[in-house]
Amino acid sequence: MDSAVDGASNYNDYYDYNNTYPLTPSAPTEVSPSHCTVMCALLATASVIIMVLGIAGNGLVIWIAGFKIKKTVNTVWYLSLAVSDFLFCAFLPLSIVYIIKGDWVFGRFMCKFTSFILFLNMFSSIFLLVIISIDRCVVVMFPVWAQNKRSIRRAWVMVLLAWVLSALLSVPAAIFRHTEIHNSKHVCYYNFTHDEEHVAVVVCRFIFGFVIPFLIIIICYVLIIRKLKNNQMARSNKPFTVMTALIAAFFICWMPYHFFNLLELNLKYASVIPTGQIIGSTLASANSFMNPILYAFMGKDFKRKCYALLSKIESTLEEEARSTLRGTSITYSGDGKLSSTV
């Protein structure tokens, strides 16, 4: 068996993005309880923060893009990306329970399905970022063609294709996922019966989930920057700063994850793999709440709606506070204990 069953004591196996750690073909490797306690606490805390921020941020994007602003090609991209990230965050509680209990209590089907959903999010999120980059490049490079050919219907077709391709690439996550009882605990883990299967899955994820998307995003933004500079379309450095931030965020979030996944194919680096995969998986997960900030909330329509929403909430709270204070003052005055003057 290529992948050892790293039980509740192996904190590396709590993350559903990869959870493959082939130390030996036999028994699981034990980690000291104190080490696990610290790492489990950090993992649980990070997961809860990502879940809360991701659900709040992506939920706000879904609400605004889906119900509050006019449907455009851009809102289709933002809505689809937010749904993908929201779906990931919605399944995080299962991983959090697994981290805390050290026992997968949800059964084999959910073990497979949760892993499939998480990789579906990974690929769909990345492919949608690629689509957004290509779309921005086309709008800048060929504005007339884009104005005539870009349509909401074509945008939905592109989104559907991205989700179908993501689903196909996520199937191995469900096929090789299994559950087993170890030290009286149920473990959800990857069971690769051959080295070739493990290598093929990791390399495929690296190529289709990072190399090709990253190259396309880089090329698109280089073309956009050159076009803006040549035509002097940018009156400030803000567009270039934003594009640099987008590229840097993509690289920082996903490169460590894929790097340590490739590293685990070589057992020489077994000592650094658990910690490295925790860092990589956490950064990859953090991408789910960074996307709304980096993509959706940079748009003028989203900013306007967010400001309007915040202003409305602030006004409601202030009005509620004034009403409460006024009612309290009148009550005290009626009791003869306090003046009604505020």
Image (tube, rainbow, N blue to C red):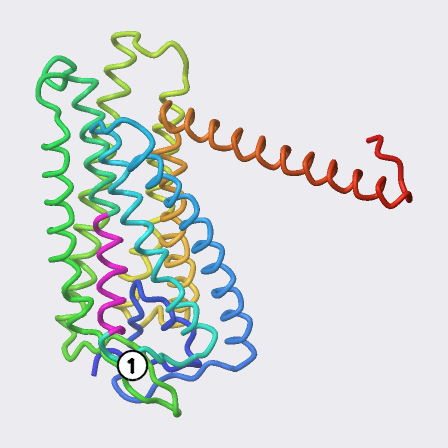
Outermost residue toward the right in this view: 337
**Magenta span main SS:** helix
Residue 243, image x and y in percent?
A: 34, 28
- Residue at the image point whose x is 33% and y is 71% from the top: 268
Up/down of 194 relative to 63, above or below: below
- Nearer to me, 34 or 312: 312
Q: Residues within 10 Å of mark 1 (few under 14, many from 20)?
A: many
Up/down of 168 relative to 60, above or below: below
Outermost residue toward the bottom in this view: 184
Locate the N terminus by quadrant. Answer: bottom left
Residue 241, image x and y in percent?
A: 40, 25
- The image quarter containing residue 336 is top right
- The image quarter containing residue 206 is bottom left
| The residue stretch that appears in magenta | 110-124
Residue 70, image x and y in percent?
A: 27, 26
Horizontal side of 287 relative to 141 (left or right) equals right
Question: What residue does disc 1 label?
Answer: 4
Horizontal side of 67 relative to 322 (left or right) equals left
Check residue 328 for magenta coloring: no
Outermost residue toward the top in this view: 232
Check residue 121 for magenta coloring: yes
Locate the C terminus by quadrant. Answer: top right
- Residue at the image point whose x is 46% and y is 53% from the top: 52
Q: Secondary structure at mark 1?
A: loop
- Residue at the image point whose x is 35% and y is 33% from the top: 296
At label 1, the amino acid type is Ala
Residue 291, image x and y in percent?
A: 36, 41
